[in-house]
Image: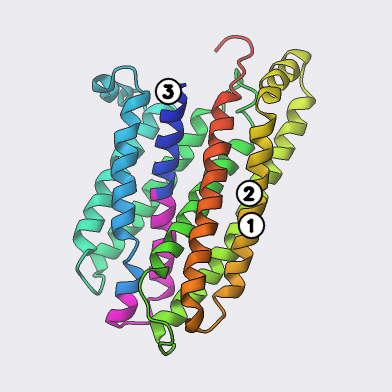
């Protein structure tokens, strides 16, 4: 069980870092025409969070390895092993991400080479999440070998990354302040975060339902094994669905709330925190259920 929770922590923390960086990078591109210090300071707010999540993710990765000091040997199997590729992408994303945060922090305007570095960080982050999901696409574990695995991993990445960015964007600000360019950009980005979160939660739940249907059409050994495990966590599955739907509802409220005047900023900030807490709880449960539903069939 310790290893299971270590995997939950490692995958979610790392994906939260990647997702936050991707949403941050999208915000940078969306705000590239607004060249003023206020906008740049707003856009760069998530950087310390990205760095902290990245470091925590890399530290927790050590807890699910039997012999962490030997992890470097796995890189020798890049041609055949998704685990090797995951380790490579983790190191690449970690080094490039920390370099980017260190270079950009304290600066107002991005230079050409830091923009190129940001693109590299985004690509290695996407590669990391893809390699993570591909590790579990194995025929010996039918409950993992469905499209629900990559959909679930990428949905969690963007869901949590978007809401973390929303939390960062909601810090600061004075009620009743005029709608400056930074405020307008925050509204646009936040509306996309709210709408995107609803869509991603729907995709994740839908993929889970479809995967359950696919598994039910397989042999008796698969159906019986998965059913026996699932029955033990029926209440937890129900809690995940409840939290997911509540999270979607609060994200919908965020889309409406961000259109209000800045005088409602305090209430909107609280709404953001609640939405993030609900979605985070749903993703922790979803990831835990993913790992405990490991039902092996045949040879590995």
Q: Quadrant of residue 152?
A: top right
Residue linked to disc 3: 3
Q: Residues within 10 Å of mark 2 (few under 14, many from 20)?
A: many
Residue drawn at x 62%, y 48% is 243
Range shown magenta: 17-40
Mark 1 surroundings within 10 Å by alpha-carbon count, few (fewer than 14), some (14 through 19), many (20 or more): many
Q: Is residue 299 above or below residue 69?
A: above
Q: Earlier in the sequence, mark 3 or mark 1?
A: 3
Relative to 111, residue 210 above or below: above
- Work out whether residue 13 can be spotted: yes
5 sits left or right of 214 in the view = left
Q: Residue 193's spot in the image, x, y percent?
A: 53, 64
Circles 2 and 1 in contact, beta carbons < 8 Å: yes
Whether residues under marks 3 and 1 lie with C-beta atoms below 8 angstroms apart, the answer is: no
Q: Could you tell me which quadrant the C terminus lies in?
A: top right
Residue 60 x %, y %: 34, 33
**Horizontal side, residue 150 vs residue 182: left or right:** right
Q: Residue 263, how many percent across, how many down?
A: 48, 83
Percent position of residue 299, x then y: 58, 9
| The stretch drawn in magenta includes residue 237 | no
Of helix, strand and loop, which one carries label 2?
A: helix
Q: Which residue is mark 2?
A: 244
Q: Is residue 93 above or below residue 142?
A: below
How far, Cα to Cα, is label 3 from label 1? 30 Å
Q: Classify mark 3: helix, strand or loop.
A: helix
Q: The residue tagged with tag 1: helix, strand or loop? A: helix
**In the image shown, does 68 or 239 lie closer to the viewer?**
239
Identify the residue under disc 1: 248
């Amino acid at each position: 069980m310790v290893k299971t929770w270590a995997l939950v922590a490692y995958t979610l923390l790392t994906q939260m870092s990647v997702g936050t960086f991707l949403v941050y990078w999208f915000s940078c591109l969306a705000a590239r025409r607004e060249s003023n210090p206020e906008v740049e300071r707003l856009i760069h707010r998530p950087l310390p969070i990205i760095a902290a999540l990245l470091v925590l993710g890399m530290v927790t990765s050590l807890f699910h390895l039997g012999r962490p000091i030997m992890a470097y040997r796995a890189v020798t199997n890049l041609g055949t092993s998704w685990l090797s590729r995951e380790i490579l992408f983790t190191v690449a994303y970690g080094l490039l991400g920390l370099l980017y945060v260190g270079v950009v922090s304290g600066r107002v305007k991005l230079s050409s080479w830091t923009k190129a570095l940001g693109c590299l960080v985004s690509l290695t982050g996407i590669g990391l999440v893809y390699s993570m999901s591909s590790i579990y696409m194995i025929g010996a574990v039918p409950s993992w070998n469905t499209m629900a695995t990559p959909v679930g991993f990428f949905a969690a990445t963007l869901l949590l990354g978007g809401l973390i960015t929303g939390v960062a964007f909601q810090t600061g600000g004075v009620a009743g302040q005029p709608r400056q360019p930074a405020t307008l950009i925050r509204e646009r980005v936040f509306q996309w975060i709210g709408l995107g979160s609803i869509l991603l939660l729907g995709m994740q739940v839908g993929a889970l339902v479809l995967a359950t249907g696919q598994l039910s059409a397989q042999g008796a050994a698969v159906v019986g094994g998965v059913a026996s495990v699932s029955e033990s966590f029926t209440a937890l599955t129900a809690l995940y669905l409840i939290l997911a739907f509540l999270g979607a509802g609060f994200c919908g409220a965020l889309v409406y709330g961000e259109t209000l005047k800045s005088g409602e900023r305090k209430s909107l900030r609280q709404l953001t925190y609640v939405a993030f807490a609900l979605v985070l709880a749903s993703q922790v449960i979803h990831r835990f259920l993913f790992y405990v539903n490991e039902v092996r069939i045949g040879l590995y």
